[in-house]
Image (spheres, rainbow, N blue to C red):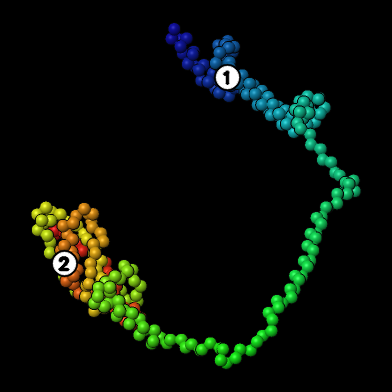
Amino acid sequence: MSSHIDKLHESASDKARRWSFSEEFLDTEDLRGISYGNLFLRKQSHLYLGHGVIVAFLCLGCFWLVSANWDRLTAWTGLFGHAEDESPQCYTVVTSVTQLPPPPPIARPEPPKAPPAAAPPAVKAPANVGKIRKVKKEEAPPEQTLATQKEIRQAIRQQVGNVGSADGAGLDVPMFVPCETMPAVLKQKKPRYPEIARQAGIEGKVFVSVLIGETGKALRVKIMKRVPADQTVFDDVAIESVMASTYSPGIQNGSPVKVWLTVPIRFELN
């Protein structure tokens, strides 16, 4: 037994040297008699790798040749030609200008006819007024002289004086009299608040029209409007306040005249 082991050790170095410098990758079929499995595939791997690379290059070359010559192949073989037949075809027709008919004539509207000239109006003969007779100086009407502005103002003052006479006719003055300067309130007397209205808590407003004389004195009064309309408790005190106030007269043509003036009087508890 020991002699057999010694022989193996002695031949081990020779075998290792022979395996390392051998032309084959692994000498498996000689050592173990194995012709299958992983060791066998590793021995044949360079053949499979070379075959795969060659086949890949051949496939790429064929694909490139077919792509570059696709039009020639389809025209030569007649395959895949129906797609081009289905595409719409466009035609361009060139028409010469000389083939076109001449354009129709343009119908121009006729110019409007001028209206007939109107006949000139007939000149009527002047009416026969007879002979002009010279008026004698004795038959001529007397000459009239127009009044001056000063005389007109004096006449107006006389009329105003007659209107304001003491017989009472001067108080009949119309409600609306035009004048240059309307009368104004110079000093108004404050009306007293009625005790009955104060106790009842009533407020209101009275519009009083007062006739202002030439001297600015109140001559007549009229109640024009009440707010509320049914409150007459403020009438007496409103008339009393208006009659006791002083006014400036109205002016017309530089002279004072009688004019109606409307004065509103408000009654408030506060």
Q: Is residue 236 toward the left or the right of residue 85 in the image?
A: left
State the mark number for residue 129: none
x, y (%) of residue 118?
Answer: 77, 66
- How many numbered marks are there? 2
The residue under the point 58% across, 10% down is 33
Check contact, mark 1 vs mark 2: CB within 8 A: no
Q: Classify 10 Å Cα crowding around label 2: few (below 14), some (14-19), many (20 and above).
A: some
Whether residue 137 is situated above or below residue 122 in the rendered picture: below
Q: Amino acid at mark 2?
A: Glu
* Residue at the (74%, 73%) spot, across then down: 124
Q: Residue at x 12, y 64 (%)?
A: 192
Q: Earlier in the sequence, mark 1 or mark 2?
A: 1
- Secondary structure category for the residue under label 1: helix
The relative height of residue 7 versus residue 130 in the rendered view (above or below) is: above
Q: Which mark is residue 240?
A: 2
**Residue 41 position within the rendered picture, expressed as x and y whole percent measured from the top left:** 58, 17
Q: x and y percent of residue 44 in the render?
A: 61, 19
Q: Is residue 249 visible?
A: no
Residue furthest out toward the top: 1
* Residue 42 disc label: 1
Q: Nearer the viewer, mark 1 or mark 2?
A: 2
Q: Residue at x 47, y 88 (%)?
A: 145
Determine the image quadrant of residue 51: top right
Callout 2: helix, strand or loop? helix
Figure quadrant of residue 68: top right
Viewport quadrant of the C terminus: bottom left
Q: Amino acid at mark 1?
A: Arg
Closer to us: 115 or 101: 115
Which image quadrant: the N terminus? top left
Residues 54 and 28: in front is 54
Q: Position of residue 58 (x, y in %)?
A: 70, 27
130 w.r.t. 70: above or below: below
